[in-house]
Image: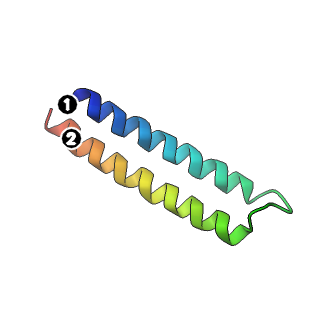
Amino acid sequence: MKIFTVLLFTCSLASFLAMFHHLFMLQRPGIYPSKRVVKQRAGVFASTGAGLLVLGMIFSLFT
């Protein structure tokens, strides 16, 4: 169960890093895909990272 918890925290960290990458992409001019799509992807990565972080914290309480 501890390996699963570490995996959740690692995936959460990866999602947050992807979110920051997309947010930094918004600062560049003339990006492809459009800024609207990049904002949506950043939001998806942020919510996924937050969800995985909460799940990891819940599982860490029970182990």
Reply above or below: 33 against 4. Answer: below
Q: Are marks 1 and 2 in contact (CB under 8 Å)?
A: yes
Q: Position of residue 57 (x, y in %)?
A: 27, 43
Question: Looking at the image, which residue sits at the far right?
Answer: 30
Left/right placement of residue 8 relative to residue 61 reads: right
Inspect the image, locate mark 2, and give the three-letter code of the amino acid beneath it. Phe
Viewport quadrant of the N terminus: top left
Which residue is found at the position 50% from the left and 61% from the top?
44
**SS label for mark 2:** helix
Determine which residue is flagged by label 1: 1
Q: How many marks?
A: 2
User: CA gap, disc 1 to disc 2?
Assistant: 8 Å
**SS label for mark 1:** loop
Which residue is found at the position 30% from the left and 50% from the top?
54
Question: Looking at the image, which residue sits at the far front?
Answer: 33
Query: Considering depth in this image, is 62 or 37 the residue closer to the camera?
Result: 37
Q: What is the crowding at mark 2: few (fewer than 14 residues within 10 Å), some, or many (at least 20)? A: some
User: Which of the 4 image quadrants contains residue 39?
Assistant: bottom right
Inspect the image, locate mark 1, and give the three-letter code of the amino acid beneath it. Met
Left/right placement of residue 51 relative to residue 20 reads: left
User: Which of the 4 image quadrants contains residue 36?
Assistant: bottom right
Which residue is found at the position 28% from the left and 48% from the top?
55
Q: Position of residue 23 (x, y in %)?
A: 66, 56
Q: Which one is in front in this view, the residue at disc 1 or the one at disc 2?
A: 1
Viewport quadrant of the C terminus: top left
Query: Considering depth in this image, is 5 or 57 the residue closer to the camera?
Result: 5
The mark that comes first in sequence, 1 or 2, is: 1
Determine which residue is flagged by label 2: 59
Left/right placement of residue 44 relative to residue 38 reads: left
Q: What is the crowding at mark 1: few (fewer than 14 residues within 10 Å), some, or many (at least 20)? A: few
